[in-house]
Each structure stands twice: as C-alpha cells, then as structure tokens.
Image: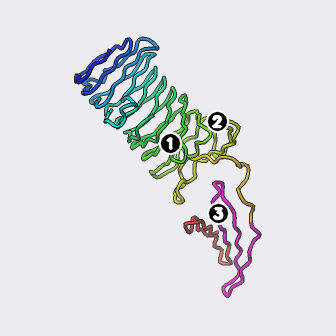
Amino acid sequence: MTTSAVSFTVGGNINVSGQVNIYTGAMHLSSDASTITTTATGDTLTWAPPYTVAGAKLTVAGPGTVIFGDAAFHSTPFTLTAETDVTSGSVQFNGAVTGKIDISGGNAGFFVLESTLASLVATGGTVTFDVPQTVAGDLILGAGATVSSDISGRAMLIAQGDVTLGATLSVADNTDYLIEKDSSGPVSGTFAGLPDGATFSVDGTEHRILYHAGFHSSDTNDVIETIGDVDAPTAALTPPTVHDTDTGTTFSITFNDATGVSNTAIIGNNNLFQVTGPTGYSTFATF
C-alpha cells in the first residue's frame, strides 16, 4: 500500500502488515503509548520524505522493518524529533534524527545522514553506524548491546555529554576512530572484554584499543583503535642526550607513544620532568 500527502495524529498503536509506503506529510504523536508494530518478518513500513514525525514518545516493536526516510530520497528532508524506543525488529534511521533514541532489542542503523541526537542509549540489540552521529546528551552503549561500524578516518560517534561503555564491539578492519569525546572527563567503562590497551583481531589484522587517547593532539579522552604493529611503539628509543649548560646538566630522550606520536622527555638538574610533543608541552611536573 502506498499513500501520499498524509498527516495525522497518533495516540495508540499502528499495526503494519505487508508493504506500506507513506510519502509527504507529518505524524504527530499525542501520547507516550504510540507504537508501530509489525506483525511478520517480511512486513515493512517506509516513511519517505518530505515527512516529519514529532511529538511524544514512539515505540517500534515486532519482527518486521521500519524505515525512517527512504535512502533513495536522502536529499529531501525527513525529520524525526520524537523520542524513539526500538524494542525488536529492524529500524533504519535514514533521515535527520534529533530526538532521544533508546535501543533495547532488534537492529537499529544510521545509514544516510549525519545527525545530532538528544541522547543515545543502547542496552540490547545491535546498533550500526555507516555515517557518524553526534550525541548532545548521554551516550550509553551498555552490556547486552552490540556496536557495529565500518567508518574509517572519522569518529563513529561525537559525544558532547557523558559516555558509558559495556557493549560488544564489532567493527570492520578499516575502522580506526570510535568515539570523539568533546566533553570533559574520562569515558566510563570499556567495551566488553576489551580493557584499555587490549589487542584483538579483525579479519587477520591486529588492533589495539585505547580509551585515553586523542584524535586531536590536545585530547586525552577519546576512544580509538590503532591498526597493525600494535606490539610495540613504531620507533625505538633514541640514546640519551646529555646537555651541559651554565645552569646544570639535563638529559633528554626521544620516544614514540602508543599512538605513534613522537615525544621528547627532558630531566633537568632542578628536578623538573618535561615531556614535549608535536604541539608543545603535554606534561610538566616536579618530583
């Protein structure tokens, strides 16, 4: 069934059987009890742009597929501002998503547009990222959920609030940058079975995961992967260099950190320990 130019208010359940396509219009959710339920695995409901789903909370249930925004029409706006709970089935977020997203089961994927979500909480099911997403509030990828991505060279998620981890990580071989945490403070928890510095194999290539690294030189709380040659720094330590000056003697040594960035450590006779990276002092302390 295909309908167009349809706008309506929903306060209860929408049952989907078969193939349903809705084009152009708006759906307003008047109650948190609003639900889309597919009745069979082959059932599909597609909301094609231009369309807006807004209002109270929406729950997606059932074994079928719900598609918010047809990927073939991604240049035309589709906006989902309502809080959306995914409990089962398969949900594709192909448009602009600005509401809260909770995933407790099924499969949910972000495939077409980059969006800024109010928050993202995954406690079950699988959530897949084909394009990066920004999360303005809390980002929780909890135990019981699986996180999948094949994004390379960019952050899978940009977190502007608190980050809590515990989910199982399942990524492609080329994935290297997982979470850019723009807010202050460390990431809480780790991905399942992957403590800080742990190595794991993806399609025969060794990866190492770090939770206190920086994609930018000033960051210390991003979550990244290093790919290949994870057993040791990329360069050996240089022999110490001794500098005699009028104010005393200093010793310096150059090394690569765990991410392959070159640093220089200097110990002076005035009990100062200084580590200098490519952008200036990264650590300065007394002992």
Q: Earlier in the sequence, mark 1 or mark 2?
A: 1
Instruction: Name the secondary structure under disc 1.
Output: loop
Residue 109 at x, y percent in the picture: 46, 31
Instruction: Name the secondary structure under disc 3.
Output: strand
Q: Is residue 128 shown above or below 88?
A: below
Instruction: Name the secondary structure under disc 2.
Output: loop
Residue 49 at x, y percent in the picture: 31, 30
Q: CA distance from mark 1 to mark 3?
A: 26 Å
Quarter of the image where one finds residue 248? bottom right
Q: Earlier in the sequence, mark 2 or mark 3?
A: 2
Q: Nearer the viewer, mark 1 or mark 2?
A: 1
Q: Is residue 15 left or right of residue 243?
A: left
User: Which amino acid lies under the numbered mark 2 shown in the image of this protein?
Assistant: Gly
* Residue name at image x 24 percent, y 24 percent: 30
Residue 262's disc is 3
The crowd level at tag 3 (other Cα within 10 Å; few <14, some 14-19, many 20+) is some
User: Which amino acid lies under the numbered mark 1 shown in the image of this protein?
Assistant: Met
Q: Is residue 271 left or right of residue 110?
A: right
Q: Earlier in the sequence, mark 1 or mark 3?
A: 1
Q: Is residue 134 shown above or below 85?
A: below
Residue tagged 2: 193
Quarter of the image where one finds residue 235? bottom right
Q: CA distance from mark 1 to mark 2?
A: 20 Å
User: Which amino acid lies under the numbered mark 3 shown in the image of this protein?
Assistant: Ser
Q: Which residues are magenta?
A: 238-266
Residue tagged 1: 156
